[in-house]
Image (spheres, rainbow, N blue to C red):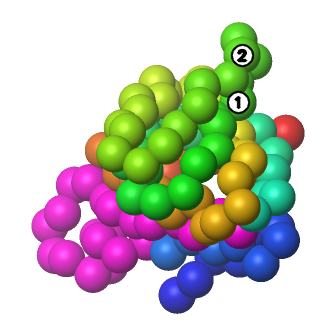
Amino acid sequence: EEIPLPNGSWSKMVLTGDTVSGIVSSLGYSVFKPGTELAMVSHDTEEVAFVVAGRGEVRTEHGSVQVAPGQAIHIPARFWHAVVNTGDEDLIMVFGFPYPAYPPTERK
């Protein structure tokens, strides 16, 4: 089931404890439409992500990191971050957590 995000963007969890018995991690993907800017979030667990298509940036309280296809990023647990699509095509990212579902998350 898609998780709606601003500007027609969305995320979807594809591997979780609900879809694979005994799994201890999770995997999902997001499609961020051009111009999408998410609010800051902080997860209880670390996150890894891989950029499949599009361009954008991951903003943090310490600055921004540009992302492009083929790049992977690591976001430590409890690290405030937000994804922004700065390009003119969909920014598609695959992400994972060492948690069997979308982890507990704070939002600003």
Q: Above or below — where is 32 with respect to 107?
A: below
Q: Is residue 36 left or right of residue 101?
A: right
Residue 73, percent from left and from top? 41, 33
Q: Quadrant of residue 28?
A: bottom left
Viewer-nearest residue: 39 or 93: 93
The structure residue drawn at horizontal position 52% and vertical position 87%, both measured from the top left corner, is: 1
Q: Quadrant of residue 90?
A: bottom right
Q: Above or below — where is 103 with respect to 108?
A: below
Question: Which mark, residue 91?
Answer: none
Q: Amino acid at mark 1?
A: Arg
The structure residue drawn at horizontal position 70% and vertical position 53%, both measured from the top left corner, is: 87
Residue 42, percent from left and from top? 64, 36
Question: In the rendered image, is residue 54 in sight?
Answer: yes
Q: Are marks 2 and 1 in contact (CB under 8 Å)?
A: yes
Q: Is residue 1 left or right of residue 5?
A: left
Viewer-nearest residue: 86 or 11: 86
Q: Residues within 10 Å of mark 2 (few under 14, many from 20)?
A: few
C-alpha span from label 2 to label 1 = 6 Å
The structure residue drawn at horizontal position 16% and vertical position 75%, both measured from the top left corner, is: 21
The structure residue drawn at horizontal position 22% and vertical position 55%, both measured from the top left corner, is: 24
Q: Above or below — where is 33 with respect to 54?
A: below
Element type at marker 1?
strand
The residue tagged 2 is 63
The residue tagged 1 is 59
Q: Amino acid at mark 2?
A: Gly
Residue 10, percent from left and from top? 64, 73
Q: Which residues are magenta?
A: 13-33
Q: Residues within 10 Å of mark 1 (few under 14, many from 20)?
A: some
